[in-house]
Image (cartoon, coloured by chain):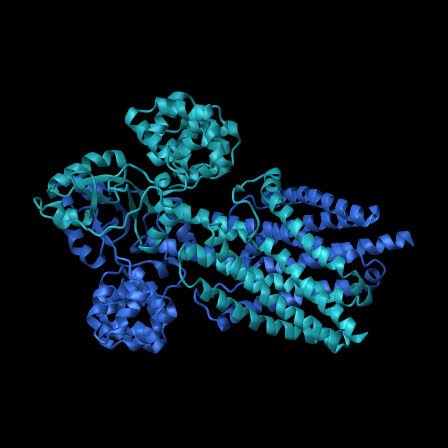
Chain colours: A cyan, B blue
Amino acid sequence: MAEVSVEELRGALGSPDDGELATLVSRLHPADLADLLEQLDEEDRVRVFRLLPAAVASETLTELPGDERGEILERVDPGQVREIFTQLAADDAADILGELDRSEAAQILEGMAPEDSREVAALLAYDEESAGGVMTPQVVAVRETAAAHEAIEEIRRQGQDVGEVMTVFVVDDERRLTGSLPLSRLIVAPEHARVADVMERDLVSVRPDTDQEEVARIIARYNLVVLPVTDAFGHLLGQVTVDDVIDILEAEATEDLFKIGGVDQAEEAHAGALQIVRSRLPWLAVTLLTSFGGAAVVAAFRGTIERLSVITIFMPVVAAMAGNSAIQSVTVTVRRLALAGAGAGGAWRHVRREVAGGVLIGFVIAGVLGAVAALWQGSLELGLVVAAAMWVSISLGVLWGALFPILLDRVGVDPAVASSVFLTTLTDMVSFLLVLGLAAALLRTLA
Amino acid sequence: MAEVSVEELRGALGSPDDGELATLVSRLHPADLADLLEQLDEEDRVRVFRLLPAAVASETLTELPGDERGEILERVDPGQVREIFTQLAADDAADILGELDRSEAAQILEGMAPEDSREVAALLAYDEESAGGVMTPQVVAVRETAAAHEAIEEIRRQGQDVGEVMTVFVVDDERRLTGSLPLSRLIVAPEHARVADVMERDLVSVRPDTDQEEVARIIARYNLVVLPVTDAFGHLLGQVTVDDVIDILEAEATEDLFKIGGVDQAEEAHAGALQIVRSRLPWLAVTLLTSFGGAAVVAAFRGTIERLSVITIFMPVVAAMAGNSAIQSVTVTVRRLALAGAGAGGAWRHVRREVAGGVLIGFVIAGVLGAVAALWQGSLELGLVVAAAMWVSISLGVLWGALFPILLDRVGVDPAVASSVFLTTLTDMVSFLLVLGLAAALLRTLA
């Protein structure tokens, strides 16, 4: 697996002869080649792509981002497209076709061998983010009643379509899944042993409509390499492999992080300025609206501010600390929900623990801030007002940070929507209300 | 794989006879059993654990959190501990021993069979977060020069120690790694074919000191099921399997998310209130200090606030929007760095794109906010001051959000330390400075 730099590749592109280019490219792993292609302009990308043997081209295609795939498939000739789709695994083919125009996808499907196109069309019918959408129908399965040497013959035959065989499934006469057959057991089994005697039963499987997050969680939880997908009658439909799951887990982690950070999860790695505006402005517009809540509170207390302007020094500190405590709590809660999955118990215990922690943290921070305010401005009353507002603000911020994601999860909304950018405008408003309300009460007492 | 509820388990614990309990527990997968055990108190947990056969006990132990493992190992009798460690994979055994007191770990090591304890002790010498720390030395390897039927015999012999064989490695006479032997190929090879003729060469491998994040990235990138670990001379030391990688990726994603959210990544799933205080108060203490920067700015402009108290209405809105834009930018940047890995090019291009997006977003938000301020308070000048402060604050916030993580990464500090809770106190300060500074200039102009 040689390393080739983008400069070397550009050098080879400088020569009109494709020979050097082809040699250079042949030394690369498809994943590395895809990375280099992303750094070229469209013209060069297509030129390199045309030189690739179909097997390499198809693997490289799966590693490229969606928009670049469409671009390439439009520009290489139909013969190469057909060859590439013959090489692609059915699930990858369905993913790629799902991104193209209907007419273009239909044209490619027509060019495929009938049984391949039937398989791919069936996959296209499943939700992209379900087990059906991420599984491949290409599995190796043998019958329970077969003898070891027949199973080996069967694996040899079926394995040619499947590439590297990771797991052999065992089915009954109706193709209902009954177990799996580790190759390491088969290899050491006597030639005439029955599959039923060496197989493993007690297999975890999922339905095609199971959400991909749940699929990933099951594979991670039980340390599986493949997870079979069956219909309601137990018929084997396909398998999800662990490498697909890694992509799902990374995508989900990115999605959660981005949502908490207030970024549309569809923002791509090389997003231009306009795409950045599109993916972030909507969240900011919402928080602009909610932040007017805080502005309205301040406006209502203009009189208090004019009579006690010193309070404006501590107002933003209280708001910042309450916001930060809420961010911490929402971060922990969203991640727990993501890792534990739906239906995880102990949600209320989690909220109780968070609030207990928040009240303690609030006490410490309020004590420090109140002491600073009292000493700096030489006013015990001011210190008490600031400390009381701080304590309550932090406690409430932590309560919401823990509660909102759980409530959203209960009503079936993605908990990460309780994003920190939204939550902090709420804690701002409440902090201002507490600081200014207490300050107004103080003024009334002193008057 | 039956589902057993914690209530059923508690019911069985109510009976003094252990028979029912043992039957119930025997129906569970170790991962599910570990979940249930976490919900019991220590007494019951140990009671259930004592009933487990060594094979189940060892698998369940690996699924439990660190502190609970230590607790259990202290309380079950030394005979059971010895049996459990005989069953554990060497990498899991090393992980668990690494968490215990030195004296306790040494005692357990002494109780193990000499070759097992040698293996585990060797693993303990590697950094926990390196390839050496996560690999298992238990691999199946055959010689290039062996015939297919000899290889099968060898796999049968070695496979007994290894559990399910996922990949067979091929080594030369000095045990230097030369390739791998997919079982699916071996199974269909003629009995007298040489391993060298059916093996795959061109294998990716890592050194034991490779960071676990890099290991995870390589496995994810090349869709591997196992990654061999070799020393500088190419001798095969062990393998990292894809299920370990899933745990690493999840832990890394949690770590990044928590750091951005200002939570110590060591906070455990069932942290009590005191642990919450310990893991979050330090971050809050730092942000309390930095938020005094904002307070100092407001204090310096007390005169301006007294003469133009209306400005305090818009001050928090400007600060909130600048903070939110910075959170968005830092979120995207940290995730890009995590997924792309060290040495990824295009960092400056990323900063340029972020700033271009930030300037555009700032323009829109500043326009809206300025118009609201001007119309609400009937003052064009006020609208201009607020809009100008907003535009510059957002642009700067986005710049820092993109720049700080990259700079931290360059100097070898985890970029996620540029957490949003820290960044927002900085954007607060700058926003106040801009709003109040421009307001003061406006007052001077009007005077």
> Height in image: B154 above or below A397?
above
Q: Position of residue B111 (x, y in %)?
A: 24, 74
Q: Position of residue A297 (x, y in %)?
A: 72, 58
State the residue lying farthest toward the right.
B447
**Left or right of A95 in this view: B53:** left
> Height in image: A81 above or below B300?
above
**Left or right of B424 in this view: B56:** left
Q: Position of residue B222 (x, y in %)?
A: 37, 44
Q: What's the residue at 38%, 71% (across, down)?
A: B67
Query: Where, quadrant-wise, is the N terminus of chain B in this rendering?
Result: bottom left
Residue A17 at least partly seen: no
Name the foreground residue: A393 vs B252: A393
**Left or right of A446 in this view: A327:** left
Query: Where, quadrant-wise, is the C terminus of chain B in this rendering?
Result: bottom right
Q: What's the residue at 50%, 73% (across, down)?
A: B274
Name the foreground residue: A97 vs A26: A97
